[in-house]
Image (tube, rainbow, N blue to C red):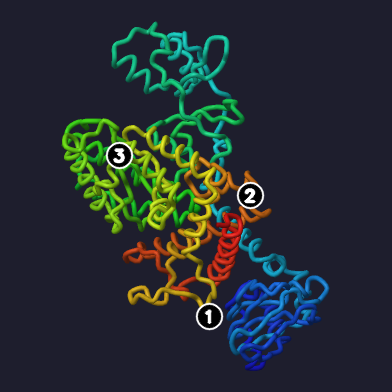
Amino acid sequence: MEVEQLEVLDFLRRFPPFGDLPEEDLSHLASQVEVGYFKAGTQILELNQEIDALHVIRSGAVEVFRRNGDLYNRLSEGGFFGEFALLRNRRVRFPVTALEDTLVYFIPAEVFIQLFENNELFADAVEVEDRTRLRQAVSRREDANQLMTSRVIRLIGRDPVTLEQTASVRDAAIKMSEEKVSSLLITEPEKHDIVGIITDKDLRNRVVAEGLGYDTPVGSIMTPDPITIDAKQFVFEAMLEMLRHNRHHLPVVRYQKTLGVIALADIIRYESQNSLFVVSSIFRQQTVEELSNLAKEVKSSFVRMVNEDANSHMIGSAMAVIGRSFKQRLLELGEEKLGPPPVPYCFLALGSMARDEQSIVTDQDNAMILDNRFDPKQHDDYFLQLAQFVSDGLAACGYSYCTGGIMATNRKWRQPLSVWEKYFTDWIETPAPEALLNSSIFFDLDGVWGKEEWADKLNDLILRKTKRNPRFLACMARNALNRTPPLGFFKDFVMEKDGKHNNSINMKRRGTAPVADLIRVHALAVGSRSHNSFDRLQDIIAAQILPKGRGQDLRDALELIAMVRIRHQALALEEGQEPDNNVAPENLSDFERKNLKDAFQILSNAQKFLKFRYPL
């Protein structure tokens, strides 16, 4: 093989899908390649031009356009174009112009067609468009570990075992022994409606330990209205529900029918090597110092989940549960130290924690809703001390102070319910710049302690007022466009220029955050009660306000962008470095670069539609 052909061969090996070809096919391909050169600004392919070769960029960069003149894509070294024309009628569908001086390898049409017909991976790579290719990449990654994507229904081994609530605890013990189960679903007499659940732990703690008689009705010691899980949800989500609510048994339902009960023991084998059992450790710690010692365990759990191919939804939910647990234990310790609160309150989680999208790199965004009887002179000293205790404790556990002051230690964010209701009403009815900034933070809120129903009340107010306020939605949409994806990938990529993170991409500020922002606008418009961006997308898709297929595209884009950010952080932790959000393009794999580019293009298109959907 001549020197020139060896150079072509070495180049093609570096880029998919050519690098995945058998060596014999790749060598033959390299021997057939011809070379062309185009100066910057030159039209390489014109609309409807006949084409006879696949074009692969050896060096330089090009811009690909739609037939109406809109920019469709930018390609650089290793990128290829002309495949759609070759697969149809050999007429160019997407005109191409050299963005800078560009060297192109031409793969003859006959060679291209032969590879397409005989190599499935090659065919998959060149046949699909950007968003479909991204979807396949995301699907392959999500399917990589079956343990992390198994459905709850797979754990059900038998029909539910039930007992009427008028039966005695003795009857319950006998039935549990006979059926060899650790729980019973309790029903109304003759109606068979599930009204509660009892477990073997309940018999120990609520009957034997309390000295109750064996003829005590099970209805008096059951847990009423038990938390349930849908059969189609993930095993991982079932475990999160158990940890979040301190339950060891969950009834499994589908279309309002109870299919069975799963226990914690049933899902341990599906759990990511005990990655979330750090939660139970949190509630056993007695001091802030002991809690802070768990920070290493949290990081290890994060890395294990990433290495075991958990998806971003699972990892974000797990980290949010851990964060909430730290807050809850700190509030318990704070109340033990300061005494009971003088009036009821609700402690709020805001932002990514409220959305179940938390990363290992995060600060603390929190607030307090106080009872309307709150008197600052009498009560505020207590709540300030409690807020400071929690905030300092979170900082000790690895959750840095919010530089913007979005913490309950700030008097502005430690207010009675009536004041919070006025805040949200004013922000929605008078959407000034500061109000819009607050909306992007506070419109993702969740109660984690105390009168959590007050958080639900504020969420209801938000939905009620925003859904019928097109002006506010339009302003929110414009605000969501302030952070744009770094298009121009890679030759004219817009990267950070702040010294420490020079020539890198902030995957939160330029990736996950703008996706979450635009999803939030659509979610408010359709009245979605979901907090998580993936869940909100499901509601948005169901409302049919997006062009067909674009909701799924956006889901795939969010998953890909989030996982690039998450894997970057996990790698830093494994190497003993401080994790951050800034990714250098040269540290990405060819696979990540290609698919991340598709994801950013989808985000850009979604932002354009947002502006169209909510005009001022």
Which label was assigned to residue 328?
Answer: 3
Q: State the residue position of label 1.
A: 491
SS assignment at label 1: loop
Q: Residue furthest bottom?
A: 3
Screen quadrant of the N terminus: bottom right
- Between disc 1 and disc 2, whose residue precedes? 1
Q: State the residue position of label 2.
A: 545
SS assignment at label 3: helix
Screen quadrant of the C terminus: bottom right
Distance Cα–Cα, label 3 vs label 1: 47 Å
SS assignment at label 2: loop
In the image, residue 286 above or below residue 169: below
Task: Please report contact status of discs 3 and 1: CB closer than 8 Å, yes or no.
Answer: no
Q: Nearer the viewer, mark 1 or mark 2?
A: 2
Q: Position of residue 31 (x, y in %)?
A: 71, 87
Q: Position of residue 163 (x, y in %)?
A: 50, 14
- Between disc 3 and disc 2, whose residue precedes? 3
Q: Residues within 10 Å of mark 3 (few under 14, many from 20)?
A: some
Q: Label 2 amino acid?
A: Ile
Q: Is residue 209 among what the camera can see?
A: yes
Q: Position of residue 140 (x, y in %)?
A: 60, 57
